[in-house]
Amino acid sequence: MVLLNVQNPPSSSNLSYHQPSNPESKQLEDTIRYIAETEFPETWKNIFPDIMAKLSNPSDYANLLGALVGLKALVKNHQFLSGKDRIPLEYMVEDTFMILSDLVKSLLNTQNEQTERLLQIIVKIFYFAICVRYFHF
């Protein structure tokens, strides 16, 4: 069971999976999304820089997957916001698109379940970001 202290938001070092299909992974994803919705960017200011660091220099599958899940949560939580509430997301999209694009290029050379899971999350991030960029309400 994954327990997170809401008083002290987790750092990105806690944002990692080991088995993408287990219930703890889903719980972690839901928890990150909830905290991102309620605490980002006011309280949990360091999450995006931590995610960027892990995306820029992926050390292993678990850390990369955790960073992507965290980014997906941030992007998804902000996809339908408007006006000044959208500003943090616009910066996130600008900062991550090239990194994610390069990551996709490198992942396409390998075919396994882990790569498929990473590509699936990246595609979802692109989708949520495109909704933000092109479908202003």
Image: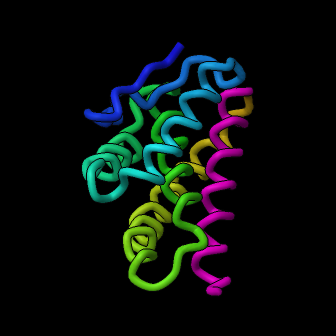
Start and end of the magenta stretch? 113-137
Kindly identify the residue that appears in the image at 27 percent across and 34 percent down. 7
Seen in the picture, residue 23 relative to 34 is either above or below; the reply is above
Foreground pick, 61 / 110:
61
Q: Position of residue 50 (x, y in %)?
A: 30, 44
In terms of image quadrants, where is residue 128?
bottom right
Kindly identify the residue that appears in the image at 56 percent across and 18 percent down. 18
- Tell me which colouring the rendered structure shows: rainbow
In terms of image quadrants, where is residue 13?
top left
Looking at the image, which residue sits at the far top? 1
Seen in the picture, residue 128 relative to 25 is either above or below; the reply is below
Kindly identify the residue that appears in the image at 58 percent across and 58 percent down. 76
Q: Position of residue 48 (x, y in %)?
A: 34, 52
Magenta segment includes 132: yes
Q: Is 114 on the left or on the right of 15, as rendered?
A: right
Kindly identify the residue that appears in the image at 39 percent across and 82 percent down. 84
Q: Position of residue 33 (x, y in %)?
A: 53, 45
Question: What's the magenta bit mostly, secondary-structure-wise?
Answer: helix
Magenta segment includes 111: no
Q: Is 137 on the left or on the right of 8, as rendered?
A: right
Foreground pick, 84 / 68:
84
Q: Position of residue 94 (x, y in %)?
A: 43, 71
Q: How many marks?
A: 0
Seen in the picture, residue 11 relative to 95 is either above or below; the reply is above
Q: Quadrant of the C terminus?
A: bottom right
Q: Quadrant of the N terminus?
A: top right
